[in-house]
């Protein structure tokens, strides 16, 4: 009789374990944020080769998944040095941003990483590479420098040679 009690107890425990293990598994995945480059006239949205100090315009568009967007971070890496170009906190379900900047003043390769974060701990990133080259002539270099610094001869009332150096030094 004692053996029969143990046997029934073993069957009950085994059956309970089997029934508990067959419960429906919940596979609810959290949908994270999405981010992409804005393409179009004037925007840099893919890897490019440009001359040093060329103006660049990056357009970013991001949308939230299951959580709200709460941070935007832009990191720029050139010759092993990482700098933060933009770091902002906010709370929104969508985000658009235009970053106006210039390519590095030295020839080489720089990597840009644009990352969006949400309040669920999720994130998404897009990356592109800008290769900077030296200009082919001094005229091209000074033409680009003039565009970047937006110096016009009528903005500074100084002798021409002094105006030239003030423009290069960005006043």
Image (tube, helix red, strand yellow):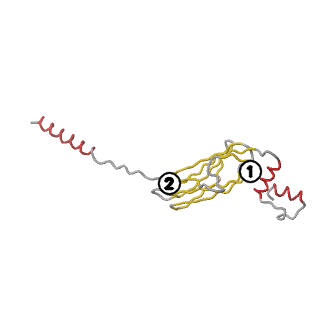
Distance from Cα at disc 1 to Cα at disc 2: 33 Å
Residue 72 coordinates in the image, percent (x, y) = 57, 55
- Residue at the limit of the structure toward the left, as seen here: 1
Left or right of residue 117: residue 27: left
- The N terminus lies in quadrant: top left
Which residue is under mark 2?
33
Against 128, is 7 above or below?
above
Residue 43 coordinates in the image, percent (x, y) = 64, 55
Q: Secondary structure at mark 2?
A: loop
Q: Nearer the viewer, residue 38 or 78?
A: 38
Residue 20 coordinates in the image, percent (x, y) = 26, 45
Against 16, is 42 above or below?
below
Kindly indicate the quadrant of the structure image that contains residue 95: bottom right
Q: Secondary structure at mark 1?
A: loop
Which residue is under mark 1?
53
Mark 1 Cα-neighbour bin, 10 Å: few <14, some 14–19, many ≥20: many
């Amino acid at each position: 009789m004692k053996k029969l009690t143990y046997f029934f107890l073993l069957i009950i425990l085994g059956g309970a374990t089997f029934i508990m293990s067959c419960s429906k598994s919940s596979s609810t995945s959290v949908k994270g944020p999405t981010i992409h480059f804005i393409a179009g006239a004037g925007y840099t949205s893919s890897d490019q080769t440009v001359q040093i100090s060329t103006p660049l315009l990056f357009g970013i568009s991001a949308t939230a998944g299951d959580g709200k967007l709460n941070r935007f971070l832009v990191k720029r890496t050139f010759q092993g040095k990482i700098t933060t170009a933009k770091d902002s906190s906010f709370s929104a379900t969508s985000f658009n941003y235009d970053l106006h900047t210039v390519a590095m003043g030295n020839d080489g390769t720089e990597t840009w990483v644009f990352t969006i974060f949400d309040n669920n701990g999720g994130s998404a990133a897009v990356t592109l590479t800008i290769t900077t080259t030296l200009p082919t002539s001094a005229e091209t270099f000074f033409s680009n420098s003039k565009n970047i610094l937006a110096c016009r001869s009528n903005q500074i009332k100084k002798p021409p040679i002094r105006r030239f150096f003030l423009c290069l030094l960005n006043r």
